[in-house]
Image (cartoon, rainbow, N blue to C red):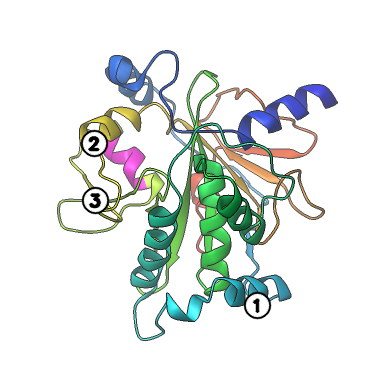
Amino acid sequence: MKNLFLLALTSLLTASCSESENGPFRYSSDYIDILKETAPYTDENADLHFSYQLDSPDADAVYSFFRLDTIVDNSLSTWENALRIGQFVTDNIPHNNQSAGIASLDAISLWNYHLNVENGFNCRWHSILTHELLLAAGIKNRFITCMPYKNDNECHVVNLVWLPELNKWAILDTDMNEYMTDDLGNLLSLSELRNCIINDIHYNIHQLTTSSPIDIDYLKSYWPKNIYWFSSHEVAGFKREPGLKSGDRYINLIPDGYSPYDVNLQIEILTSNDSAFWAIPE
């Protein structure tokens, strides 16, 4: 069991947004059909306790190291500051599927690695770096692993940013240089994006920065595959990986009746209660 868990964890840590063997373009309609046929979420009991570590020595160290006072502006909204941080990460760190060779996945270590090894980051490393920068700037967020129905050794990881002014979550994807809105300009969360895909509701993909052009048709073909189920740390904080730290758990949101792969039920929680999984931060 231990070896299986280590294999699963390694798969998550090296998650990337490259095309899988079956390619998102070719099978996009199949993935949408799978989503449409999925059982709904439930209101089952879910004893979840998501927390956000904003004030800590780690937050102070990251804030100082990255000179976040030159990036964020207290007069701006949470989303405007999140965009500034997202643009900083996207502008400086290119996408690379094969990130490897670092012992500590924290913002400062990742940045120093970036300075010495010019090969870019995969989506998980992107999201961890962004996660710690946002927390250090006082912005609550989680990095979420977005998983496909079947294990094809490829998933995607993004940040979900809490916007207190709007009382909602919003996707921030520094790896693929994107965020989403509906046709009224409202920012979309992962839950809302999934709903749009299932119900054929039009949505818009926007670039975070012009430094790295995006292919919107590709992204709209890509997302239906990796939005079937989700995994998140229960503690949003610093130095969360590699490994699972004391007092933390992996929480997995799955459709009712679905049996996910790569899950160790000794240390991970399964729930089909989407309201509990996407809970408003306290």
Main SS, magenta region, reads: helix
Give the percent coordinates (x, y) of residue 51. 64, 63
Query: Alpha carbon of mark 3 to alpha carbon of mark 1: how far?
Result: 31 Å
Give the structural element (helix, strand or loop) at label 2: loop
Rendered position, 247 above or below 194: below
Q: Which residue is mark 2?
A: 215
Q: Is residue 145 inside the magenta stretch?
A: no
Label 2, residues with CA under 10 Å away: few <14, some 14-19, many ≥20: few
Residue found 37% across the figure and 17% down from its top: 23
Residue found 60% across the figure and 25% down from its top: 260
Label 3, residues with CA under 10 Å away: few <14, some 14-19, many ≥20: few
Rendered position, 27 above or below 103: above
Residue 1 in sight here: no
Q: Which mark is residue 206?
A: 3
Does 240 sit left or right of 247 as displayed? left
Give the percent coordinates (x, y) of residue 127. 52, 50
Please provide the residue range marked out in magenta. 192-197
Rendered position, 57 above or below 46: below
Q: Of the residues shown, which amino acid type is indicated by label 2?
A: Asp
Q: Of the residues shown, which amino acid type is indicated by label 1?
A: Asp
Give the structural element (helix, strand or loop) at label 3: strand
Q: Which residue is mark 1?
A: 60
Give the percent coordinates (x, y) of residue 224. 35, 29
- What is the residue that sits farthest to the left in this orientation? 183
Quadrant assignment, res 166: bottom left
On-image quarter of the C terminus: bottom right
Q: Is residue 196 inside the magenta stretch?
A: yes
Query: Alpha carbon of mark 3 to alpha carbon of mark 2: how far?
Result: 10 Å
